Amino acid sequence: AILSLEPPRMGRVHVIEMSSYQIDLTPSLDPTVGILLNVSEDHIDRHGTLEHYAAVKERLVAGVQPQGTAIVGVDDGWSRNIADRIEQAGRRVVRVSVKNPLPDGVYVDHETIWRAAGGARGEIAGIGGIGSLRGLHNAQNAACASACALALGVSGETLQKALRSFPGLAHRMEQVGRCGHVLFVNDSKGTNADAAAHALSSFADIFWIAGGKPKLGGITGLAEYFPRIRKAYLIGEAAQEFAATLGTQVPHEISATLDVAVAHAARDAEASGLVDPVVLLSPACASFDQYRNFEIRGAAFHDLVTALPGVKPVV
């Protein structure tokens, strides 16, 4: 995809999302603006240790151009240390938080993005009621994108309009459709427990489709969200492991395949009588046992949902 972009020139901005694999392999990385959202335990099979994984992700912001900007989410210890380190190396750092107000940086408080500096703060934009930005992780995405836009000279008015009209991205808390009160959400990009936690924290009554090729630690770290799950539908290699973790805390079935999981979750959500039930695909697993990548898995979910009788697009 990168090779298909127009050549660089003055005034042209390319936005490129890089995986840790790509960062690790690239010989040079010196963006005008670098954004590091967080560091959590993932891809250890590739990188060996969390320390090495964090060092790889640090390259996103450590190599920004001398007059550029490093934007770092500081809601985890690894990222806070990275922000301190690159600031000491002379880079301009904008810290971002969705958990705590910052004396200097960009943060989210009561569904509003704020910019603070010198003891004063100013409102950047309100994000309440924007369905495509539901959840703390999307608030962080919006805050980091806002910090980036401001660093590039985008006006506050333009930024607010862009946030309000943002349609969301495929496979990332994508609202696929609705059937009556039942909302179907495609979060196939949720390939580990930390990512799935963001999705699970965003809804109250969840019919959860999970499983695939399991990651280290499984879903044991998601116990605080179990009360939100009305029933789980487990697929792929992780199904038995996840069933053991859920035990008697969460009603569940081993659906084995995505088509069965979607059909059963849709049936149960519709019959639940709940006000706002959500059928959520957020697998907390890689896709490689049944699908080539998370995009293909998400596309399969999308097709299965839109083929259900009565499902309409979310407007």
Image (tube, rainbow, N blue to C red):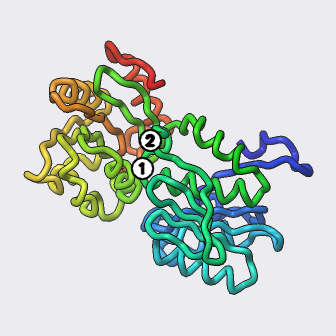
Name the residue beneath numbered marker 2.
173
* Residue 40 vs residue 23, the one in the foreground: 40
N-terminal-most mark, 2 or 1: 1
Q: Secondary structure at mark 2?
A: loop
| Residue, far bottom | 88
The reply to whether residue 3 is in sight is yes
Name the residue beneath numbered marker 1.
135
Q: Is residue 221 above or below residue 17?
A: below
Picture quadrant where residue 263 is located: top left
- The residue located at (54%, 64%) in the rendering is 107
| Residue, far right | 10
Do the numbered discs 2 and 1 sit on residues whose CB atoms are within 8 Å? yes
Q: Is residue 262 above or below residue 212?
A: above
Q: Is residue 188 above or below residue 148?
A: above
Q: Nearer the viewer, mark 2 or mark 1?
A: 1
95 relative to 311 in the view: left or right = right
168 relative to 255 in the view: left or right = right
- The residue located at (22%, 59%) in the rendering is 223
Q: Amino acid at mark 1?
A: Gly
